[in-house]
Image (cartoon, helix red, strand yellow):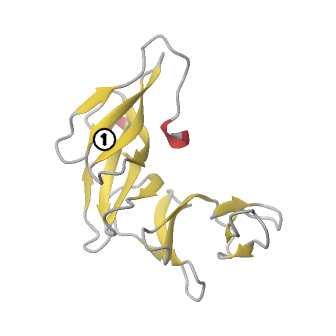
Amino acid sequence: AMVLTGEGASEIYVSSAQGRSPVRKTRSDAVKSSPSWSPDGSQIVFAMDPGPQLYVIPAGGGGAPRRVASGFSYMAEPDWCRTERNKIACTVRVAGGKYQIAVVDVATGQTKVASKAAYDAIEPSWLADGRHVVCTVRDRRSSVLAILDTETGHSSQITLNDAQAFQAGVW
């Protein structure tokens, strides 16, 4: 799954692993980003303006995007857990304009903020255990990678403070 803009607005496309024969899955003028597959490959979650907010579409086509319920004005950078079909990690904006990692329960629509970063925690990427994510933790001067336990909120930094800026989304 990918975002392409060749026909105007950014749209979600699906292609073969070799990138051949892309098939357009969305049609709207809204900006779309960060597609992520469901564990069984039947759905794709992505972020779409306004907001942005999270939406799910059937991977096979035939259906309008369905908004994932939330209590946040900003939800982006989704990553669907590969071991638990109802869990999506994403970045949300919380009080004070900071960004934190949240976990959405797709079945109930409930969203729980999982991180407790002093400044920002962004770009979650699930680890194979279905409990931890790698994420970027940043302040105004630095950016590090951390492993976040989404159940306890405890995080452990895994890169040096004086290293160049990191992005968890490319983990």
Residue 14 in the image: state x and y as whole percent. 67, 70
Residue at point 43%, 39% (across, down): 122
- Looking at the figure, which quarter contains the N terminus? bottom right
Spot occupied by residue 8 in the image (x, y as percentages of width and height): 81, 65
Q: Is residue 18 left or right of residue 45?
A: right
Residue 73, how many percent across, how many down?
40, 55
> In this rendering, is residue 40 above or below 73?
below
Residue furthest toward the left? 152
* Residue 115 image offset from top left, x and y in percent: 27, 39
81 and 116: which one is in front?
81
Foreground residue, 164 or 11? 164
The residue lying toward the viewer, choosing from 74 and 45, is 45
Q: Residue at x 30, y 31 (%)?
A: 117
User: To which quarter of the image does residue 70 belong?
Assistant: bottom left
Q: Residue shown at 82%/68% (left/top)?
A: 7
Q: Which residue is mark 1?
A: 95
